[in-house]
Image (tube, grey):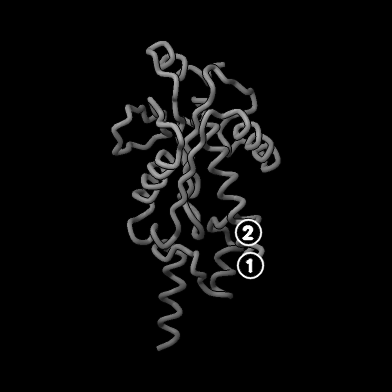
Amino acid sequence: MEMLGFEKKLYKKGYNLIGGIDEVGRGPLVGPVVAACVILPKNFYHESIKDSKKLSEKKREELYDIIMNNAIDVGIGIIDSKRIDEINIYEATKEAMLTAINNMKLKPEYLLIDAMKLNTNIPYEAIIKGDAKSESIAAASIIAKVTRDRMLIELDKEYPMYNFKKNKGYGTKEHIEAINKYGVLDSHRRSFKPVMDVILKEKVEQK
């Protein structure tokens, strides 16, 4: 039950609507960065809810349904690759988190955020490795991860040669080879070095 430590301290202070926030997709070369804000019922605990990276895809899908069915409120923020290129991934991550908060029906009274400082009038605590320390943040990490993975699986149907259903847009050897062979897609992040390198190479070859 140590995953509820941060939440319990806040319950004692009189906060009830505690929003856990996390994001997924800062590192990939393609697709959006996705953030989620989740308000769980008071003292809600599920032993399997933990950092999404430590869970299998099947388990994340199961927990996604459990969280969505039990949460008081969930907000999701999606910032696409074009916007990431415009403002950089760090700023896009913050924008995704703020969008997730704005997309909620209820305004959280307090936020627990995974290692990110936000410009918001809602009081918050930024917790390093928060998805391993807070049930609310871990729940948000699962919602964000499943949401983004589903988007990459859809993209894979359009462009199976990049194998997005497996690599989820990360810069694997296979993915980089596919970019070199088949080119850069609209959903690729042009400001990310491996993609930029291919674009520059194509320009040189065209000359």
Q: Which amino acid lies under the numbered mark 2 shown in the image of this protein? A: Glu
> Picture coordinates of residue 31 (x, y %)?
51, 58
Residue 120 vs residue 191: left or right? left
Few, some or many residues within 10 Å of mark 2 (<14, 14–19, 20+)? few
Give the residue at mark 1. 158
User: In percent of the image, x 58 and y 30: which residue is there?
Assistant: 50
Residue at the top extreme?
12
Camera-side residue: 5 or 193? 5
Name the one closer to the observer, 206 or 77: 77
Find the distance from the CA under tag 1 to the CA under tag 2.
7 Å
Q: Quadrant of residue 56?
A: top right
Left or right of residue 200: residue 66: right
Residue type at mark 1 is Glu
Q: Is residue 174 depicted above or below 73 in this figure?
A: below
Residues at badges 1 and 2 in contact (C-beta under 8 Å)? yes
Residue depicted at 55% across the width and 33% down the height: 51
Q: Quadrant of the C terminus?
A: bottom left
Residue 160 sits in which quadrant? bottom right
Q: Mark on residue 154? A: 2
What residue do we see at 54% from left, 73% from top?
180
**Mark 1: secondary structure:** helix
Residue 43: image quadrant is top right
Residue 117 position, x and y percent, is 33, 36
Q: Quadrant of the N terminus?
A: top right
Give x and y (percent) for residue 178: 59, 69
Q: Is residue 3 above or below residue 63?
A: above
Image point (59%, 20%), residue name? 45
